[in-house]
């Protein structure tokens, strides 16, 4: 007689809110197994009973046929005593005291829902909140875990009979899809003037909004994680008005296109870029523009050869494009430097001088999030902003550490992370902590994670800089606090992502980071592991004349570098950039070292080079210098500048004398990039360690491409985390987690 067996599976990972339980129900039914599946605070518990052949087939299917959004990070199997269940069932969530099941990012509309949206015979035809288990909002609507409707902002909307039937049918694609609704029972759209006057609801509101955009108005639309500012991307006059109203002189705007074919008319796409643009993540992807005449306004991304493009990612966007004539600017609705706005009352208060009309809906955005931004280096992702579709980002780490740890990140491009139950969970992008709104979001994000996971940290870890808002907040918490040097944390984040524990040569280049010696670092070569680091090389320091004033008025950096190398002879060259009076005052600051901290930052070198390449005025956004230099790069120019490297110092100032001789911007930009590549190759040749590239400078696609093309070492850089300061929180955690 063949006996039955009973097995239990404890599974952790992305297994809630992704159709995992109905998937288990389906394969258990396929193999005539009995038992149950339920969500619990750590993930999913399965018990299955049947003959061994069926149990083996079930286990194989469990791991090979996962739902599109599911991910198993950890599983444990145990043999149990048979209970002789008569069926297999999906049970209600087990609400225990410890919460560690993962909160998922919002996802764009899937192909199945898109088909229904366009099918006149389907009851969700043109329904602007169409979603299913495989797509739609998650992070933006969740209040706490487990991810069940009562704990989301869909709780006030009572399902109609048809939606309830789908929601309770384990074989339906919408089984326990928490945001499920239809035109009978779901949220309502409202089109209003910025003064609050109601102009239309639901599809009528969408049609009127499209008419306003087509007529040249600047409007706002409430997306999945917050409001977008929207206007016609082909009109110079309209884009100019948006720049003027938003006080955004040159920072590029992202452009949303109706479909991939429309993007291809404007941009050159690799196969990987096409795949990324069309993926369920629907990020903004930075791509090369065609050199031919463009339909898109030249004011969208002035002076650079890249365009940030993306596709509609909600049913609302998809329907809107049925009534639009052209691609649209779709940029975060916020005051410069502040987080995206998610409430209509705040929009009316803060942007009443920018927006004329706005489309709102009555489902609360519990957790706001911006659009994710990335680019591709060959087939590899270079992530610049991790948010909608990507964050919260989680990955399991091999560790024996049982503590709960909070990492508060850096000051710019801040994100936080927690370590809990062997998982690192990274928040969506918060932003630069330079204003009250961003500081409030920083604290709210920490509160969110505390609520999601019943999380109170045993330890906090942050940056070495004493004046960072994140550092100051941490010091007030009466919880043990550890500080980690900025560039060391950058390198540790790459080591953590790639599961490296041995010694590495970390190359961390960015704009600013507080060094051990109290100066500003940013051109670092560190030999390190989890236990510590040695600074084996760095760029020779120079003074930032006037401190932060140099970061905006970047010709001050050029002045500092030229005075260091040429002395008074530099004045004749600097009079091309300053009037005599301004130059005299600046020279006094230089001579007397007034508020002029020393800096070894490669990011600041980019600024000085950009001035020589023709960049005028103040920097208006982070990375502007790098984008200009990229646009000028000529791959046919293979020479580099002569630099001397001795002991631990890279003597880079002599480059600028050579640049003055070259004069031609394309030559200067190309040889500068080539010189940086040469420095990386030369110094890495002295070590046998794997090489890590990290920091905001390595967002420069051209620089990365040239290094990848020429280096022979094992090379690692962030693929799932931002290479800028958005990934530092993970490095901070990796320093203190016991592995």
Image: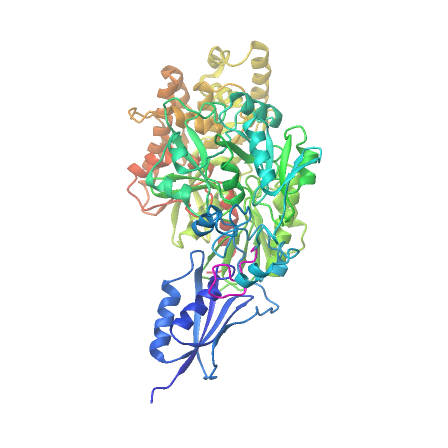
Percent across and percent down for residue 344 are 67, 40
Side (left or right) of 529 relative to 126: left
Q: Is residue 250 above or below residue 520?
A: above
Residue sitting at the far front = 121
Magenta span: chief secondary structure: loop
Give the side of residue 98 with respect to residue 174, left or right: right
Total residue callouts:
0
Name the foreground residue: 673 vs 332: 332
- Which quadrant does the N terminus fall into? bottom left
Vertical placement of residue 226 versus 21, above or below:
above
Asked if one can make out residue 229 in the rendered structure from this viewpoint, the answer is: no
Q: Is residue 121 magenta?
A: no
Locate residue 95: give its quadrant: bottom right
Instruction: Give residue 321's position: percent from left, percent from top.
Output: 50, 37
Which corner quadrant of the image does residue 291 belong to?
Answer: top left
Residue 490: x and y in percent read: 47, 44
Taking the spot 61% from the left edge, 35% from the top edge, the residue there is 334
Q: Nearer the viewer, residue 583 or 222?
A: 222
What's the coloring here? Answer: rainbow
Q: Would you say residue 247 is visible in this rendering?
A: yes
Q: Which residues are magenta?
A: 168-180
Seen from the viewer's position, the closer of residues 181 and 93 is 181
Residue 300, x across and y down, in percent: 49, 26
Asked if the magenta segment contains residue 179, the reply would be yes
């Amino acid at each position: 007689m063949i006996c039955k067996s009973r097995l239990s599976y404890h599974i952790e990972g992305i297994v809630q809110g992704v159709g995992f339980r109905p998937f288990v129900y389906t394969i258990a039914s396929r193999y005539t197994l009995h038992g149950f599946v339920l969500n619990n605070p750590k993930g999913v518990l399965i018990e299955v009973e049947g003959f061994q052949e069926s149990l083996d087939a079930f286990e194989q299917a469990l791991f090979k046929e996962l739902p599109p959004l599911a991910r198993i990070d950890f599983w444990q199997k145990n043999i149990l005593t048979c209970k002789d269940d008569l069926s297999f069932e999906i049970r209600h969530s087990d609400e225990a005291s410890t919460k560690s099941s993962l909160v998922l990012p919002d996802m764009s509309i899937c192909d199945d829902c898109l088909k229904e949206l366009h099918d006149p015979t389907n009851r969700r035809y043109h329904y602007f909140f169409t979603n299913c288990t495989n797509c739609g909002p998650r992070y933006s609507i969740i209040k706490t875990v487990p991810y069940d409707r009562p704990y989301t902002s869909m709780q006030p909307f009572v399902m109609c009979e048809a939606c309830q039937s789908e929601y309770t049918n384990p074989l339906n694609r919408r089984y326990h899809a928490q945001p499920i609704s239809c035109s009978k029972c779901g949220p309502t759209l409202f089109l209003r003037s910025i003064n609050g006057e109601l102009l239309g609801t639901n599809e009528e509101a969408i049609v009127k909004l499209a008419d306003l955009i087509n007529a040249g108005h600047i409007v706002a639309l409430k997306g999945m994680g917050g409001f977008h500012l929207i206007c016609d991307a082909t009109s110079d006059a309209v884009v100019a008005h948006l720049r003027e109203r938003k006080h955004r002189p040159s920072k590029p705007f992202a452009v949303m296109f109706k479909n991939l074919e429309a993007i291809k008319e404007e941009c050159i796409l690799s196969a990987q870029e096409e795949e990324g643009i069309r993926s369920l993540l629907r990020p903004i992807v930075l791509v090369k523009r065609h050199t031919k005449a463009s339909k898109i306004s030249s004011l969208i991304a002035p002076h650079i050869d890249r365009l940030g493009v993306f596709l509609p990612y909600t049913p609302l966007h998809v329907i809107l494009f049925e009534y639009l004539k052209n691609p649209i600017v779709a940029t975060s609705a916020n005051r410069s430097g502040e987080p995206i706005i998610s409430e209509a009352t705040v929009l009316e208060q803060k942007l009443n001088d920018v927006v004329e009309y706005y489309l709102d809906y009555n489902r609360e955005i519990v957790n706001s999030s911006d659009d994710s931004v990335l680019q591709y280096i060959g087939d590899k992702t270079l992530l610049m902003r991790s948010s909608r579709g990507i964050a919260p980002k989680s990955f399991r780490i091999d560790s024996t550490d049982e503590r709960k740890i909070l990492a508060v990140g850096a000051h710019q491009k801040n994100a936080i992370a927690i370590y809990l139950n062997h998982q690192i969970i990274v928040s969506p992008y918060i932003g630069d902590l330079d204003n009250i709104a961003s500081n409030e979001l920083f604290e709210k994000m920490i509160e969110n994670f505390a609520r999601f996971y019943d999380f109170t940290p045993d330890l906090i870890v942050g940056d070495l800089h004493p004046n960072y808002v994140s550092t100051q907040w941490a010091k007030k918490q009466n919880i043990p606090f550890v500080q980690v040097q900025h560039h060391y944390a950058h390198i540790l984040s790459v080591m953590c992502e790639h599961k490296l524990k041995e010694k590495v040569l970390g190359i961390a280049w960015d704009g600013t980071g507080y060094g051990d010696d109290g100066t500003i670092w940013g051109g670092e070569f560190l030999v390190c592991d989890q236990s510590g680091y040695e600074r084996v090389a760095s760029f020779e320091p120079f003074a930032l004349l006037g401190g932060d004033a140099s970061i905006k008025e970047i010709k001050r950096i050029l002045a500092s570098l030229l005075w260091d190398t040429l002395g008074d002879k530099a004045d004749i060259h600097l009079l091309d950039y300053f009037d005599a009076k301004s130059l005299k005052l600046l020279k006094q600051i230089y001579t007397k070292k007034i508020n002029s901290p020393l800096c070894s930052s490669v990011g600041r070198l980019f600024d000085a080079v950009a001035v020589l390449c023709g960049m005028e005025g103040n920097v208006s956004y982070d990375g502007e210098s790098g984008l200009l230099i990229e646009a000028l790069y000529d791959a046919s120019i293979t020479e580099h500048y002569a630099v001397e490297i001795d002991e631990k110092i890279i003597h880079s100032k002599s480059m600028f004398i050579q640049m003055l001789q070259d004069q031609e911007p394309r030559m200067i930009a190309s040889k500068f990039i080539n010189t940086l590549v040469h420095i990386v190759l030369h110094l890495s040749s002295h070590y046998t360690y794997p090489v890590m590239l990290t920091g905001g400078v390595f967002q420069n696609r051209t620089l990365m491409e040239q290094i990848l093309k020429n280096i022979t070492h094992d090379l690692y850089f962030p693929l799932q985390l931002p290479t800028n300061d958005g990934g530092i929180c993970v490095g901070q955690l990796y320093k203190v987690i016991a592995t």
